[in-house]
Image: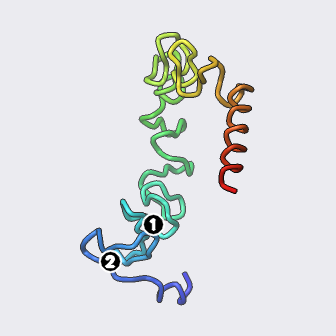
Amino acid sequence: MDHKDLFMVHTMPTYQYKRIIGQKYFYNGEIRIWDGRQLRCQHNREKQKCIDCKGSGICPHFKIRYNCVDCKGKGICQHKTQKSSCLKCKGKNICTHNTKRQFCKQCKGRYICRHNQRKYECHKCIFESIVKELKHKATRK
């Protein structure tokens, strides 16, 4: 850290409403950044998940410990995939039709449009969004 950066660090106000978003503060002898909700590390990441700060949520393989296959993280099932998306374990992101819930046409997942296609592949939806954008630009002039 440069000496110039130290002049930009402030003492942290006790009350949250007095803190400024993006401002660097001293907290427990460390430089932290306020994001409007929580204190982040000096790299503007969650402290636990920051590789540079050697956060507690980072495993020896430099991955998020919860999702690390090698460490047998809690988010990994016996089939070595994420529990929530495992077809064999019926994870929470798997619907009754045995597909990922967000892509399921029968369940009308969030990535399925009103034309029963994937939103980013539907030519009708893409065309409609282009027309809508052009109309919006025309009304701004």
Figure coloring: rainbow
As drawn, 38 above or below 119: below
The 10 Å Cα crowd at callout 1, few under 14, some 14 to 19, many 20 or more, is: many
Which image quarter holds the N terminus?
Answer: bottom right
Left or right: 125 as drawn, with respect to 65: right
Q: State the residue at coordinates (52%, 10%).
A: 97
Query: Dot 2: within a 10 Å radius of its alpha carbon, few (fewer than 14), some, or many (20 or more) residues?
Result: some
| Position above or below: 105 against 133 | above
Identified at 50% across, 15% down, the residue is 107
Q: Residue 141's quadrant in the figure?
A: bottom right
Looking at marks 2 and 1 on the same chain, the residue that comes earlier in the sequence is marked by 2
Q: Which label number is shown at residue 33?
A: none
Front position in the image: 87 or 70: 87
Q: Residue at x 47, y 35 (%)?
A: 72
Q: Residue furthest left?
A: 14
Q: Position of residue 95 (x, y in %)?
A: 48, 16
Image coordinates of residue 11 in percent, x first then y, are 34, 82
CA–CA distance between discs 2 and 1? 14 Å
Secondary element type, mark 1: loop
Tally the numbered discs.
2
Q: Position of residue 106 (x, y in %)?
A: 54, 12
Q: Amino acid at mark 1?
A: Cys
Residue in front for this viewpoint, 51 or 40: 40
Q: Is residue 20 above or below residue 77?
A: below
Nearest to viewer (mark 2 / mark 1): 2
For residue 10, above or below residue 98: below
Mark 2 residue element: loop
Residue 12 disc label: 2
Which residue appears at 69% of the width and 32% of the height?
Answer: 128
Q: Which residue is mark 1?
A: 41
* Residue 51, horizontal then vertical, whole percent: 53, 58
Tag 2: residue type?
Met
